[in-house]
């Protein structure tokens, strides 16, 4: 049985699945005995809770705004260069 | 994993760097070459925007190090990006084959991949970038826009507020990171309606307030559809926006012929005909 990540990759690389309807995908996932959270995400069109159910935290969108700050001086004194992972720190 | 390479690297120094793009949609966009870089690396650093995509990357290599934890609310993003450069360079200097994996295209709206390649090359290491399918690429496909038809300007939204720029309303205008517009600290992850109102005030010099603008976000997961919302320019401040959403303004005016240049072209054509007959 494939897990959620394997199934997402399979959908993403398959021309007949990538743009299939929610009904078609739900049917395929049922046949594949997909994890319930993935099937629910497809059926509802809401994938926002999928990552949470897989135990991962929300993430910042990297490489955001930089205009006018490329030459800012780096002040290392007030920053821990190796902060511990803290899920509460991260939000979109 | 550990797919044998046909060629051994011939670096002036041990250690190398490749910055590759993951594309935007899980499973759909990763190029064979980018995947090969990931699989052949000794260590992989991940600058991705979706935890599921990061989990997918972790299936490709046993040593994937997320760069996410270096972000912090209230901390300058430039400081974070410099830390990323140092993290990657530390491994390159240790003689490792390093792969930096970034969502979309690694060189678009991405300071650290360009910087770390510059630093690595300056220190004598082999370093290069492999392109990826970017949010801009997806935008053209999903919105049916051809940038060659009327032309297309791209700006980070804050740049329009902070600097004197010339907007051409006869072409498309694509504004990136409108959700962060006006953040001069680079330490926040969103601003708000009052900041976006300043942007609308500026845009209203070139566009009517009832001009339709498109708020766009591409699909990150292959079970998602792109998010496309159309609002009037005047309503942009109150529209829900994150840093991942892009704002597109279609042309507001028709192209104006440049009669002076057309006359000069006519003259050149006439001269060419004369020369051909001579």
Image (cartoon, rainbow, N blue to C red):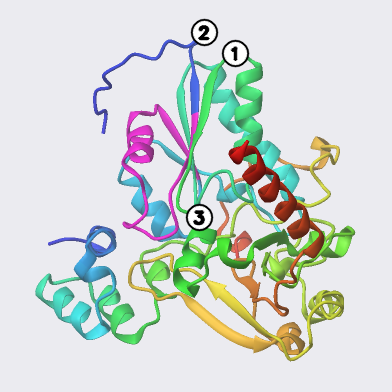
**Element assignment for label 1:** loop
User: CA separation, marks 1 and 3?
Assistant: 29 Å
Q: Is residue B163 above or below residue B223?
A: above
How many residues crowd around disc 2 within 10 Å: few (fewer than 14), some, or many (20 or more)? few
Q: In the rendered structure, which disc, 2 or 1, sits on the residue that comes first in sequence? A: 2
Q: Which mark is residue B124?
A: 1
Please say whether residue B42 is one of the residues in the magenta stretch: yes
Q: Quadrant of the N terminus of chain A?
A: bottom left
| Tag 2 near tag 1, CB within 8 Å | yes
Query: In this orientation, which residue lies closer to the viewer: B6 or B248?
Result: B248
Please tell me whether residue A4 is drawn above or below residue A75 in the rendered image: below
Q: What residue is shown with label 3? A: B134
Total label count?
3
Magenta-colored span = B18-46
- Both marks 2 and 1 on one chain: yes
Q: Percent x, y for residue B117?
A: 60, 29
Q: Residues within 10 Å of mark 1 (few under 14, many from 20)?
A: some
């Amino acid at each position: 049985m494939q897990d959620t990540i394997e199934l997402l990759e399979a959908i993403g690389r398959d021309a007949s699945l990538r743009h299939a309807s929610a009904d078609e995908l739900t049917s395929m996932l049922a046949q594949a005995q997909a994890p319930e959270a993935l099937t629910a995400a497809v059926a509802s069109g809401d994938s926002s809770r999928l990552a949470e159910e897989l135990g991962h935290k929300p993430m910042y969108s990297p490489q955001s705004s930089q205009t006018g700050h490329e030459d800012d001086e780096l002040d290392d004194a007030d920053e821990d260069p190796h902060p511990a992972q803290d899920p509460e720190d991260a939000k979109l | 994993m550990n797919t044998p390479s046909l060629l051994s690297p011939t670096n002036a120094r041990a250690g190398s760097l490749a910055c590759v793009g993951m594309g935007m949609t899980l499973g759909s966009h990763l190029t064979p070459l980018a995947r090969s870089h990931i699989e052949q690396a000794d260590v992989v650093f991940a600058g991705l925007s979706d935890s599921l995509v990061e989990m997918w990357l972790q299936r490709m290599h046993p040593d994937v190090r997320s760069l996410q934890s270096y972000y912090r609310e209230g901390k300058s993003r430039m400081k974070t990006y410099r830390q990323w450069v140092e993290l990657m360079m530390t491994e390159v200097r240790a003689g490792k084959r390093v792969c930096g994996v970034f969502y979309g295209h690694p060189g678009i709206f991405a300071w650290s991949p360009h910087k770390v390649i510059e630093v690595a090359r300056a220190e004598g290491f082999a370093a290069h970038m492999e392109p990826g399918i970017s949010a801009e690429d997806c935008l053209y496909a999903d919105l049916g826009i051809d940038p060659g038809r009327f032309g297309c300007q791209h700006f980070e939204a804050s740049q329009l507020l902070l600097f004197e720029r010339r907007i051409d309303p006869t072409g498309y205008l694509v504004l990136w990171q409108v959700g962060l517009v006006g953040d001069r600290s680079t330490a926040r992850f969103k601003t708000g309606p009052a900041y976006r109102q300043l942007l609308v005030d500026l845009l209203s010099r070139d566009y009517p307030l009832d001009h339709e603008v498109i708020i766009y976000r591409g699909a990150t997961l292959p079970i998602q559809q792109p998010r496309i919302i159309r609002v009037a320019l005047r309503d942009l401040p109150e529209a829900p926006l994150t840093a991942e959403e892009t704002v597109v303004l279609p042309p507001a005016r028709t192209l104006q012929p440049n009669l002076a240049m057309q006359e000069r072209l006519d003259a050149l054509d006439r001269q060419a005909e004369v020369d051909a007959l001579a």
